[in-house]
Image (cartoon, coloured by chain):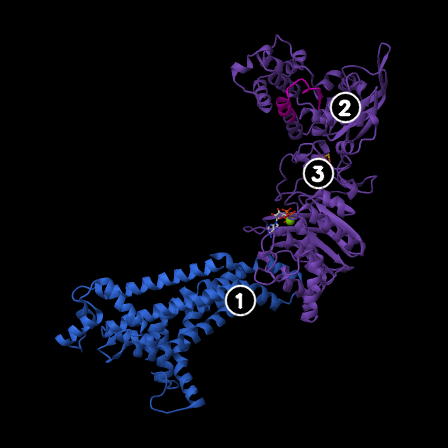
Chain colours: A blue, B purple
Amino acid sequence: MRNRTTKIVTIYLLTIFFLLFLNFLLPRLLPGDVILAMYSGYEVTITDELYNELVQLHGLNKPIHVQFFIYLVQLAHGNLGYSYICHAPTTTLIMDALPWTLLLVCTSFVLSAIIGMILGVESSWVRGKRTDQSLLVSMLVVDGVPSLAMGILFLTIFSLYGGWFPTSGAMTPYSNLAGIAHIKDILWHLILPLTTLTLSQIPGDYLLIRNSMILTIREPYVLTARAKGIKERKIKYFHAARNAILPFFTRIGIRLAYVITGVLFIETIFAYPGLGLLTYNAISNRDLPLLQGILTVSVLLVLLINIVVDLLYKKIDPRVEYAY
Amino acid sequence: MPLQFKNLNVKYRLSGAEDNTITALNNISLKINEGECVSIVGESGSGKTTLALASMKLLSQNAIMTGSVVINGVDTSELSSEEMRKIRWNEISIVFQNYGDVLNPVHKIINQVAEPLIKNGESRNTALDKSSKMLDYMKIKTGRSMLYPHQLSAGERQRVLMAMALITDPGMLVLDEPVASVDAITKLYLAEVIRKQVNLGKAVLLITHDLSFAALCSDYTVVLYSGNILESLPSEELLDAPRHPYTRALVRSFPVMERAKDLAGVRGAPPSQTSTPKGCIFQPRCTQSIDVCLERSPQAVSTNGGGVVVCHRGGIATMISVENISKSYKDIEVLKDVSLKLDEGEILALVGETGSGKTTLAYLIAGTIKPDGGKIIFREKGLDKIDRKEFAKMVGIVYQSPRDSISHRFSVFEAIAEPLVIHNAFDNESAGKIKNALREVQLPVDDYFMRKYPHELSGGELQRVAIARALILEPDLLIADEATSFLDPSVQAKILRLLLNLQNERGISMIFVTHDIGVARKVSDRVAVLHDGRIVENSPTHHIIENPQHEYTKRLIDAVKSSKISDL
Ligand SMILES: Nc1ncnc2c1ncn2[C@@H]1O[C@H](COP(=O)(O)OP(=O)(O)OP(=O)(O)O)[C@@H](O)[C@H]1O
Ligand code: SF4
Ligand SMILES: [Mg+2]
């Protein structure tokens, strides 16, 4: 048991180390001068003074392993660099944006998972019947619409044309709302991006669960449950679906990747001030330090999620103890 | 009448065309009373599990069922699924064949055992309490009940399934291979548990391929073959006195501790299930089929043992019956009032010391000498009324010493061809036939070998040639007179094995004359012991070895045992 834990921890540490190293290496592999490549944008002029300061900061006059060490030390202090374009420390920028993205991603991830699962389970249970077929077709149609197009459509209809929802932001600026009103305001801003993101995720979850359920229904234990005279709904969820959702958890990494790409577009469309929008801005401004910071944070987040999923998976599939 | 199947037919629709079906059960009628255990035996794929599933209306969607299953007087085909749900696990429960995930892998076993109680409205605590006790009763160690299925051994899972089936105390139990993966001691314990349930008045349908378990636990045994009932008989007769040729073949292929005879599979393969033959379904594999077997399917007939056998010939038929035979050479009375029966497809060992009259009896049966008194009936006809030459074609003899039976002037080819020549049956296909015969006895078939003369062959090779010669006319009866006794042990073992394989493949009857009861034990279904011209004992082989009745037999067995010890 201890051995296994050590092994897993080592694997994670190595992965983190490797990814950070890549992140550290990338700007240094860019053609030309590192400092110029990293910091020159059309709004920034790099004075000689600033240039020397930056060389000092990154230890660019020192050997590469020392540079990496400096990078790690700064990272450990929570210092991800400075964005000369936004005139703010990268860490601050990211920390301001992160909660909004987390709110959006987590809510939509959970919502789409629950809705996708329920639809998938119900659909597979009446496989081949009309309900199943119409659900399947509509899911395939929704799946075919790019989230970008969906977002624009919603924005046009519900915000620009209907005016029921705000066109941008995560809350009304300078409104000084508090308590329930504040929460309402946040939700009001959240609804459109959340709906778009969730809708774009549901078909994937639905199809995964439906397929998995179709296989699970044939398992002997489902027959056992039926033989025992268990009620239909309990067989469906407690015996079949409980097993059918397992592939969803093994694929959480991939599914998250979808959500993260999705969020990039959706935050941009709805001007929702999360990491996605921040990334978009960093890219369009060629703000490399900010981009690098976002990358680092994302890597750490994804790994963290993986650890949580691993632990969680052990809870939901008792057989997995032996998987390592 | 707790559980009854009436004219049950089950077909499985296969993918593809609408009428592409296989027949899994064909017209099954069966009753199981309170306090009665009926076991179903049969090869894999014979439809045992299908029957179990049908009993609880759990057949898969592609199954087409006609006929009915009656549970406590209620025809289940008329019940709604909600009504059926209430019957399940309250009136009838099942132990599924234990492969794959019969238990849900993500739930603790105790919860799965308790589930039927909870669904019946018991409180969670009482349910868990009862389940824990039941698991205890099934010898699952306390503490292990909190585990998940994959953490248990196959044998433990088997007992969990049993605990689950018993938890609601239903009046009927269906057990599909409940001892397939448990050790001998646990098996005995499970037998005890099952017997106890039967004694409590339950109706138990026990499906097993373990014939001795069927004999141990059940009152009746039903033999299923390719979806058809071929025989039903009291379970205590299953191992000793099966009536149907198929049942005998099953028994022969089943290892029992007491039996030392080499295992022989059921010859041939089960029939295709996509078409129904016109005649008897077992015909292609039967050792005693007659013309009518191809024409019409047989009807069930009652046997005097209280069972039923589905066979045109009323079950295993008698091939030869020897009635009150006596024979003297000059003044010496060699055989005194001997009576004996040989069934179709049976291997009988005639055991006795030198001079006991074994060979004389064998030759009388072969028709080469005539009895002084009594008669011999071959397939319901007196031997004296059968044409000598015709009869000779039906009986092959392998003698003690091949050098006596094969003329030294014949080459291997000529020696084997001779019987064909004698019966005017030598034609241009014969050479191929002879080669086949040589292959069957595992000898080379090149010209060089076939031109060899007896003195150029080893004893083992020559005996094989003699066997090929005895079988070339495709006899129905093979008499082997001390055919292996002068060979060294390893060759002897090979020849014995060969004879048994040939017997099994061709389904012929065999009389095996030997002085060595040890050899008899390895080859025969039945042993007849000759002593002083009389048959002093005649029973199934394992009975004689286990429990010899006559002093003389005991002496023979002791002699074999002590010689084995001195061999060490
Ligand atoms: N769902 C199904 N669809 C199609 N064919 C089936 C199905 N279930 C069983 N069969 C076929 O029906 C026949 C009888 O199967 P069944 O499972 O009843 O055999 P069995 O006697 O229980 O065999 P075993 O001893 O191997 O368990 C077999 O030929 C099998 O292939
Ligand atoms: S004798 Fe005929 S009816 Fe009887 S089992 Fe053999 S083939 Fe079937
Ligand atoms: Mg089976």
Q: Chain of mark 2?
A: B
User: Relative to residue B365, is residue A279 depicted above or below?
Assistant: below
Identify which amino acid the numbered label 1 is placed on: Val
Q: Are marks 1 and 2 on the same chain?
A: no
Q: Which residues are magenta?
A: B477-496
Q: Position of residue B287 (x, y in %)?
A: 70, 31
User: Mark 1 packing: few (<14 Cα in 10 Å), some, or many (20+)?
Assistant: many
Q: Nearer the viewer, mark 1 or mark 2?
A: 2
What is the C-alpha distance between the residues marked 1 and 3? 49 Å
Residue B322 is a magenta residue:
no
Q: Taking B530 as reference, is B24 left or right? A: left
Residue B491 is a magenta residue:
yes
Q: Which mark is residue A121?
A: 1
Q: Which mark is residue B351?
A: 2
Identify which amino acid the numbered label 2 is placed on: Val
Q: Taking A257 as reference, is B296 left or right? A: right
Residue at 64% x, 29% y: name it.
B501
Q: Position of residue B187 (x, y in %)?
A: 70, 48
User: Mark 3 packing: few (<14 Cα in 10 Å), some, or many (20+)?
Assistant: some
What is the C-alpha distance between the residues marked 2 and 3? 23 Å
Q: Is residue B501 visible?
A: yes
- Secondary structure beneath dot 2 equals strand
Report which quarter residue B225 is drawn in: top right
Q: Position of residue B311 (x, y in %)?
A: 75, 37
Q: Which mark is residue B256?
A: 3
Q: Chain of mark 1?
A: A
What is the C-alpha distance between the residues marked 1 and 2? 71 Å
